Amino acid sequence: MELIFIRHGQGEHTMDMPKSLQHCDPALTSLGRDQARLLKDQFLLNEKDIIIISPTRRTLETALIFCGNSNCRMVVSPLVSPRMFPIHPHKKTLPCDRILELDRIKNEYPDLEYDDKGNSMELWEIGINTMDERTFEILARGFLSKCKTVDNGRVFIVSHDGTITSYHQLITGGILSREDFPKETEWIQFRY
């Protein structure tokens, strides 16, 4: 099984930092949309592939552009929502990293699937951003185990730099830093 983490395209929240980090619900910029279109040339998707998406506008937009007209499954999950890296559990989530409400996503994106059966509503409300490391590891290991059950397809995860780095560190057992953050629409691939 191939597991491919992709960072979203350039978002509006990166245009005038640090002030723009206070922007709620940032979308992709025109450059971000172009970056997402380029992903289609990197990976030819098919109906066996699955894209798991963080519940933020910029990741949803990236995934929808990337998916294009392919018949792959698309699932929104709070287990790949924004995550602070390194973790500062006493800090608050920045406005740009607040996840969209489940009902709002379902209303705006009715054709997507939702990983809302085994996850608590609290997880859909606050995500994993400031979750303590031990709780994150338990949930992340369960999520990765579920990903391994995908037969004959690839699992693409469209997420955020800190989230991808947190999963990368968990998978490899290495010690990573912010220097290891993927750039916009950059990906990291693992084989199981």
Image (cartoon, rainbow, N blue to C red):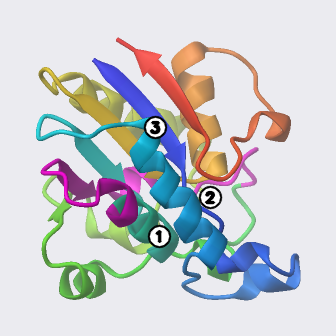
User: In the rendered structure, are the residues bearing label 1 and label 2 in contact, judged by CB atoms less than 8 Å apart?
Assistant: yes
Q: Quadrant of residue 101?
A: bottom left
Provide the residue designation for mark 2.
Answer: 130
Provide the residue designation for mark 3.
Answer: 42
For the N terminus, give its image quadrant: top left
For the C terminus, give its image quadrant: top left
Provide the residue designation for mark 1.
Answer: 126
Image-based side of 84 in relation to 83, left or right: right
Q: CA distance from mark 2 to mark 3?
A: 32 Å
- Which circle's residue, 3 or 1, is located before the other in the chain? 3
Q: Residue at x 75, y 21 (%)?
A: 175
Against 101, residue 76 (above or below) is above
Residue 137: % across, % down: 49, 33
Q: Residue at x 11, y 41 (%)?
A: 47
* Observer-nearest of 75 and 167: 75
User: In the rendered structure, are the residues bearing label 3 and label 1 in contact, judged by CB atoms less than 8 Å apart?
Assistant: no
Q: Mark 2: which secondary structure?
A: loop
Q: Is residue 136 magenta?
A: no
Amino acid residing under circle 2: Thr
Q: Mark 3: which secondary structure?
A: helix
Amino acid residing under circle 1: Ile
Q: CA distance from mark 3 to mark 1?
A: 33 Å
Is residue 81 visible in this depiction of the protein? no
Against 73, residue 110 (above or below) is below
Is disc 3 surrounded by few (<14), some (14 to 19) or many (20+) residues within 10 Å? few
Amino acid residing under circle 3: Gln
Magenta stretch, residue numbers: 64-88
